[in-house]
Amino acid sequence: MTGTGRSAGVGALCVLAASVLWGTTGTAATFAPAVGPLAIGAAAMGLGGLLQALLAAPQITDSVAGLRERRGTVLLGAASVAVYPLAFYSSMHLAGVAVGTVVSIGTAPLASALIERVVDGRRLTRRWLLAATLGLLGTVLLCVAEAAHATAATGRSSLSATLLGIGLGLVAAATYALYSWAAHRLITRRIPSRAAMGAVFGIGGLLLLPVLAITGAPLVASWPNAAVGAYMALVPMLVGYVLFGWGLAHVPASTATTLSLLEPAVAALLAVLVVGERLPAAGWAGIALVVTCLAVLTTPTPARRARNPVGHDSNRSPKTADAV
């Protein structure tokens, strides 16, 4: 493997590790049932974002000029960071852990691909399209299986909630794709990954503080609730997004969001094993397709095809090439 190939491989592993951590958030939230989804989202992303900015303060200070020059991208990413957790956790609350995670993360690669195609003019390879198709088909299967099960168990009112949850999941997918693209764009414009992620998530965290102030009282009402909030902020949000930032330094946003399809598979498995949700056969088939998608995307490219990186055409710069 070339140096670029090795760095892309490390970047992919960072994104996959982050996805595993993110996959635990829905299950963790079920241990604080008295805490609403808005409070959970604001605490997780808000506090996690502020901590990330605090740790990256030296890098942010060194990159102030570059960040100011690209303030439009920073603010777009920050606004997306603020909207994403509110839509994501509300989606899981209404549609269930599995469906909410599947829709929010499962459709994000398509949103990322559209953004990169329209804004950056990047073409997607057949390999990426195959992986994304398998992943999307898997997420649809998992979503339909869970929705059908919920309708059969609790009737039409549950179906209405599921449909609303799916709609919010699409909002979460769009904002996830937007802040991933914004962070990647900053990084490829010579802003260090820690500075880029710290600025975007720090400002996003500030935007979430009013929501946390209004809805967060249940978080401090008991130690279990506080423990859930602390876990969400420190592990999946802080550690997870530090890993994600490292990954974005080496793979494009469309590839990173496709690799993140591991998250709904992890969430669905934990929902079955820990929460006690039931997953029909079609749901298991969906998880299998997601795993196949990841295998297609992360299998090393043969040397003769190394000049055509996964996810994009050969005109991309070596710094951001994706050779996983």
Image (cartoon, grey):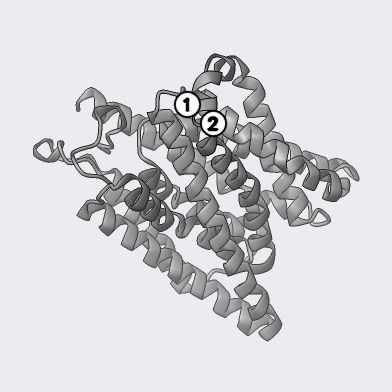
Please state the horizontal and vertical placement of residue 172, each as a whole percent of the image: 57, 56
Query: In which quadrant of the rendered image does the C terminus lie?
Result: top left
Please state the horizontal and vertical placement of residue 135, each as a whole percent of the image: 37, 59
Q: Is residue 60 above or below residue 8?
A: above
2 and 1 marks in contact (CB < 8 Å): yes
Is residue 155 among what the camera can see?
no
Quadrant location of residue 302?
top left
Residue at the location (68% across, 49% down)? 28
In the image, 11: left or right of 308?
Answer: right
Secondary structure beneath dot 1 equals helix
In the image, 190: left or right of 240?
Answer: left
Secondary structure beneath dot 2 equals helix
Q: Which mark is drawn over residue 197?
A: 2
Distance from the alpha carbon under mark 2 to that under mark 1: 6 Å
Residue at the location (45% across, 24% down)? 191
Residue type pointed to by label 2: Met
Please state the horizontal and vertical placement of residue 277, each as a whole percent of the image: 63, 66
Comparing 223 with 201, the one in front is: 201
Please state the horizontal and vertical placement of residue 289, each as a whole percent of the image: 36, 62
Residue type pointed to by label 1: Ser
